[in-house]
Image (cartoon, rainbow, N blue to C red):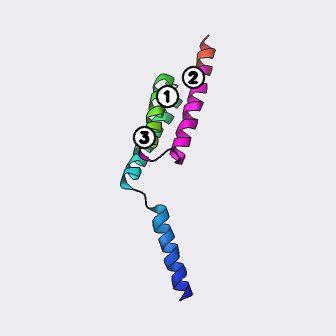
């Protein structure tokens, strides 16, 4: 009996932990696509466009998943890195 309760509890935890609203899953896919584009543009040193796409990814995360989601943190970190790269690229040209 105890083993059955433990299994049922483990299943319940998995269901609650891994289930997300449909909008969040869709936003996650959109966020992933945008971040793949960010990586591509960054490798190409297309700094003017990459920041815009990174900001779009941030907006998707904030509006659809919530401010406390790790995607928001990652997006903010990406934007900070991109601003630093843009400054360095500008300084290198001058």
Q: Is residue 43 magenta?
A: no
The residue that disc 1 covers is: 51
- Please tell me which residue is depicted at 40% across the width and 52% down the height of the picture: 25
Between disc 3 and disc 2, the foreground one is: 3
Q: Which residue is mark 3?
A: 60
What x and y, as percent, mark residue 69? 52, 48
Q: In the image, which residues are magenta? A: 63-87
Residue 21 horizontal side relative to residue 93, left or right: left
Query: Which percent across, then down, holds residue 86?
Result: 57, 22
Callouts 1 and 2 close, C-beta under 8 Å: yes
Q: For the residue labelled by badge 2, is the local secondary structure a helix, a strand or a loop?
A: helix
Which residue is denoted by mark 2 in the rendering?
86
Q: Position of residue 35 (x, y in %)?
A: 47, 39
Q: Which label's residue is closer to the chain start, 3 or 1?
A: 1
Question: Between marks 3 and 2, how big is the CA–CA gap?
Answer: 23 Å
User: Is-magenta flag for residue 86?
Assistant: yes
Q: Residue at x 62, y 10 (%)?
A: 94
């Amino acid at each position: 009996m105890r083993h059955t309760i433990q299994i049922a509890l483990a299943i319940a935890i998995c269901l609650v932990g891994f289930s997300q609203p449909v909008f969040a899953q869709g936003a996650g896919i959109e966020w992933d696509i945008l971040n793949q584009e960010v990586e591509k543009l960054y490798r190409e040193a297309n700094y003017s466009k990459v920041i815009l796409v990174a900001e779009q990814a941030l907006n998707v995360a904030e509006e659809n998943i919530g401010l406390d989601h790790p995607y928001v943190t990652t997006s903010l970190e990406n934007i900070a890195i991109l601003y630093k790269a843009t400054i360095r690229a500008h300084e290198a040209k001058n």
